[in-house]
Image (cartoon, rainbow, N blue to C red):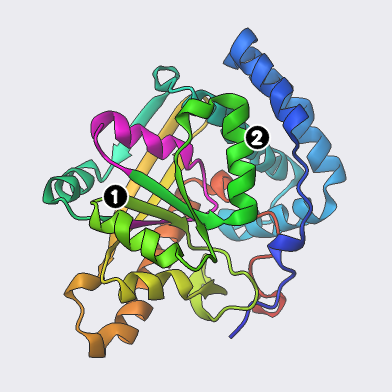
Amino acid sequence: MHQRTPHWKSRPERSNRLALGVICWIALRLGRRVARLVLWPVAAYFLLFGGTSRRASLDYLSRALGRRARWRDAWQHIFSFSATILDRIYFLKDRFDLFDIEIEGEPLMQARWESGRGAMLFGAHLGSFEAIRALGRRIPDQRIALTMYEDNARKVNATLDAVNPANRPEIIPLGHVDTMLRVKDALDDGALVGLLADRSLGDEETRPITLLGETAQLPVGAFRIAAMMRQQVIFMAGLYLGGHRYRIRFVPIMDFGEVAREDRNRAIDAAMHAYAQALDECLRQAPMNWFNFFPYWPSDSR
């Protein structure tokens, strides 16, 4: 089944390098407290004039909160998104000292690193991926590679060049002839290969999963790659808890290295549902962290 909602890739990007440069200057010269004051009018602007995003926010929050969401809920949602973008600047500058960061599942990641095996980290457009880099402070020799589509890779590189070009992570662009070979080489080298598994490009196969008590469509591709490469899949999330607090979460999903070929399809289904369950728990515990500001659930699922 294919996703029937308007596709996220058709939504225009509202950011640009000039605006990012201004925000970086304020954040790094005047400090985080002053920079956060700027987020108030920014969040208010997008709440008032971002009609589609506001409606998607209210629809999602009504599911996550278990009640009809109000405008102040949507404002808090948008503000949280803006706050994680601001904090990205400090994470890219390695200013982890500004934050109180809790890591759930650290023994899992330590054991995986000690084994010398690579693993695939499946995230979502949830919270802050940059906060997850705090793991590198606990395991400094850990190699992390990110897979993303070329347009997104260019935007990420532009962001990093504006903030800290020396701190650019390894990025493997998707859709190239050698993409899978580069992913395999990184995994064989013991790297963590991260990707966001919650969005479809619109023309790939999806399967129904239950998220916040209702049916949504989750793309299959990432899980097939993990199964084909017989890799361990770990759910990852960097949840923003307000103020200067973050909670990083790692949850084991599936080790496809232990799955027989004839059981692969059942294992893919099980992994997709385990991923959805881990995502569901995050959304219920920290609902302001869901940053898919477009209709995610089919309109007839309500």
Q: Which residue is mark 2?
A: 82
- Is residue 257 or residue 165 the one in the foreground? 165
Q: Quadrant of the C terminus?
A: bottom right
Q: Give whichever of discs 2 and 1 has the lower sequence position.
A: 2
**Residue 206 coordinates in the image, percent (x, y):** 54, 79
Q: Which residue is mark 1?
A: 191
- Which residue is at 44% across, 50% downward? 146
Residue 118 falls left or right of residue 183: left
Residue 17: x and y, percent?
73, 32
Residue 230, placed above or below residue 160: below
The amino acid on which the numbered mark 2 sits, given as a three-letter code, is Ser
Stretch of the chain drawn in magenta: 120-143
Q: Is residue 163 magenta?
A: no
Q: Nearer the viewer, residue 50 or 175?
A: 175
Q: Where is residue 142 drawn, in percent x and y?
A: 26, 40
Question: Which residue is depicted at the point 79% across and 42% down?
Answer: 47
* Residue farthest to the bottom, as pictured: 262
Q: Can you name the residue that lies furthest to the front here?
A: 177
Q: The disc labelled 1 sits on which kind of residue?
A: Ala
Query: Can residue 221 be seen by looking at this rendering?
Result: yes
Q: Say how many tags the image has.
A: 2
Quadrant of the image for the N terminus? bottom right
Q: Give coordinates of residue 103: x percent, y percent.
A: 31, 37
What residue is drawn where x is 87% and y is 44%?
A: 49
Q: Secondary structure at mark 2?
A: helix
Against 129, is 229 above or below?
A: below
Compared across the picture, whether 122 is left or right of 137 comes to right
Q: Nearer the viewer, residue 11 or 228?
A: 228
Left or right: where 15 falls relative to 244? right
On the question of residue 291 being in view, the answer is no
